[in-house]
Image: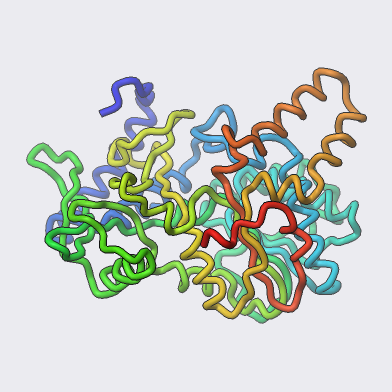
Amino acid sequence: MHSDLPLPDPLAQAHSDTLAAHLRAEIAASGGAIPFSRFMELCLYAPGLGYYSAGSTKFGAGGDFVTAPEQGRLFAATVAGVLAMALRSLGPRARVLELGGGSGAFAEVTLKRLLQLDALPDRYAILEPSADLRERQRDHLARTLTPPVFDLVEWLDRPFEDDWDGVLFANEVIDALPTPRFTLRDGEVFEEYVAMDGDGRFVRTDRPADALLAAAVRHVEHALGTPFADGYRSELLPQLPYWLQAVAGGLRSGAMLFIDYGYPRGEYYLPEREDGTLRAFYRQRMHTDVLRWPGLQDLTASVDFTALAEAGTGAGFDLAGYCSQASLLLGNGIDRLLADAEARTDEAGAMRLRQELKRLTLPAHMGERFQAMAFARDVDLDAAFLLGDLSWRL
């Protein structure tokens, strides 16, 4: 238990208690336990109650964590240049599909930059499951975009259902997919579940894994060339290929760009990482008490980029590139954007911009922990990944 975490205020605690009661009812109705992936799904996305479905502040200094687009304008402006490479080659009917959308900051800066680059898409769609975040994004973009550009933006309940050409972008999305957790006992694969103790507190328990999860664990063991030790516990997303094909929908020609924190498979499943990568974020603090305060903290697991590469190429796309976030940004002109922005501000503003660049690119901050992976079909994104190729690590 992390006693140094600030306690929720009474309203927040009541909100968490309501979701906890919902979780207990589902556990009781499911024979006394539910898969951890289901627990995570409800904690994050239960309508009106989950972390991303309720109305508290998530992003920025006043929330629980700070994503790259919330650092300032440099991240989105640089990534927009990468998206523009594909959009220009696809023609005037090309679309952009952003998964999630955060506060709307990424969409705002990206659309303004694409306008400057003469690469505006025909439609800019945001696939956002949270009604609350949709309204925040809509308000933000209505305030910050001119009407002709704002009119390009739409919000979707599901991926495009028709055939389309364009670019799919996701920043810190895969880490929030509800993930199964596995462990090994006497060489057999078990799945982590969540149950209740005699006092109604949530506790971990394990049950034999189903065929899909067991096969996925064996696939990873085969790729690593060694079995997992008994007691080793981690995360695995056997549904990742199906999820990727679902969100891409009928994407015919175009690209997909994912930025997230994670590792290639050989590093993800290191023996010393024996309890996986799962953690919680609460008021700018990272901790491992993921069963605490349902609905009030973000739950997240790192991305296995080797699994993502398998999913993307399995869906019929070419792996266009894989590198650190620092390499992607530095290789696509963030230094030039910084210089342009410094020329338009005072010394205090220039200092803030330089600090932003450091947070985005230095290894001690986001530069190496976050990585970028792109897939392409009928477009060429090679120029975006000329610096710091990491595909040999996959």
Q: Nearer the viewer, residue 385 or 5?
A: 385
Quadrant location of the N terminus in the rendered image: top left
- Residue in the picture at 44% in, 57% down: 177
Where is residue 40? Give x, y as percent.
35, 51
> Compared to 52, does 91 lie above or below?
below
Where is residue 314? Give x, y as percent.
52, 77
Q: How has the structure been colored for display? A: rainbow
Where is residue 45? Give x, y as percent.
42, 52
- Residue in the picture at 86% in, 41% down: 336
Q: Nearer the viewer, residue 375 or 198?
A: 375
- Residue in the picture at 29% in, 73% down: 215
- Residue in the picture at 76% in, 28% down: 354
**Is there any visible trace of residue 155 in the rendered image?**
no
Q: Is residue 17 shown left or right of residue 267?
A: left
Where is residue 279? Give x, y as percent.
38, 41
Q: Is residue 290 shown left or right of residue 67?
A: left
